[in-house]
Image: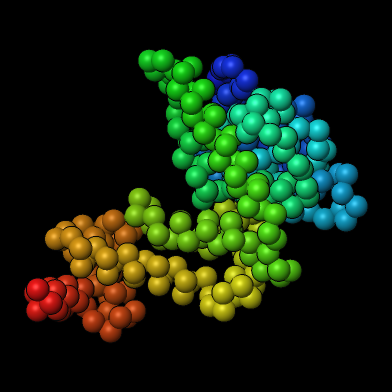
Amino acid sequence: MALIEADIEVEGMRLQLLRENFPAPSHHHTCDTDHTVTLFLPPVGFSGQIRFTDRNDGEYRPISPLYFRAAGVGIQSVGTGGDARWVRLSFSHDHFVELLDHEFDWTWAKLEAGLTLSGTPVEPLMMRLGREAMAPGLASKTLIQALGTAAIIEVARLLDSGEEQPRKGQLSAGQLNVIRERAASLSEPAPSLAELARLCGMSERNLLRLFKQTTGESVAAFVRNIRCDRAREMLAQTELPLKEIAYRLGFASHSSFTAAFRRETGINPTDFRRDHAIRRARAH
């Protein structure tokens, strides 16, 4: 049974902060009476999959730390277990329709799209709701109402876009976006394969295979290219010291950043910055 750390109700929705130590492996059968958006808070040390009990294929599908589940849709979930803390926003279908100002047609494609929402605009909204649940401030319920409404609308937009399904044996556009956004993040070190697999709701082996089939390149090369692009931007557009750029990109030291940049570009960061400045001066 989950421990409820916070439970706040506002018009049309309910925000909860919960914690539970799930057994390993964990198995659950549920059918919620309300729609729910759930975000497992970092660090997320487990992974899981979901099967729609009313769908004939009986196939388990990957689930990311942020996901949506529709009211009245039975699911069976399996997970690796472990201690977890999560934020849950629940709301009735009537409130959902009222916010959208039209009826929402459910399809399996939309339900599947809701299983992997990490890296989407919903994530920062849910993180902010989580912080508010932990430490409510001035006009807390008004803020929760506003953030919750924004999260619900963003979910609806994402579910609509989920109608276009990825080709079999490939990653979805949403999963690629999760990887791209995480790789480009300057607030954390470069992501590991295990972290990216967890965010996409699949095993490391499946991620390696599907990513290669989808993009034609390896996960490692993709992440390196994105981090290198960010390095070029910072070298060209800022006057930050190399030590600071290395830190923001998640490198342990200035020397390790310099070596990695030279390996990818064939030139060291100082020379790249100088050459860019010369070209810019000549252009003006």
Q: Residue at x 70, y 54 (%)?
A: 163
Q: Residue furthest right?
A: 56
As drawn, is 73 to the left or to the right of 23?
A: right
Q: Which quadrant, please, contains the N terminus? A: top right
Q: Percent position (x, y) of residue 186? A: 34, 55
Instruction: Inspect this view and state whether residue 134 appears.
Output: no
Instruction: Inspect this view and state whether residue 276 appears.
Output: yes
255 shown above or below 89:
below
Q: Residue at x 60, y 45 (%)?
A: 157
4 shown above or below 262:
above
As drawn, is 211 to the left or to the right of 231?
A: right
Tell me how many marks there are.
Answer: 0
As drawn, is 27 to the left or to the right of 222?
A: right
Is residue 207 or residue 144 the one in the foreground?
144
91 shown above or below 48:
above
Q: Residue at x 40, y 59 (%)?
A: 184
Q: Percent position (x, y) of residue 138? A: 38, 15
Is residue 112 or residue 281 the one in the foreground?
281
Q: Check the image and tell me how it is coloured.
A: rainbow
* Residue 190 figure quarter: bottom left
Q: Percent position (x, y) of residue 12? A: 63, 20
Q: Residue furthest bottom?
A: 266
Q: Residue at x 87, y 49 (%)?
A: 55
Q: Percent position (x, y) of residue 143? A: 45, 22
Q: Which quadrant, please, contains the C terminus? A: bottom left
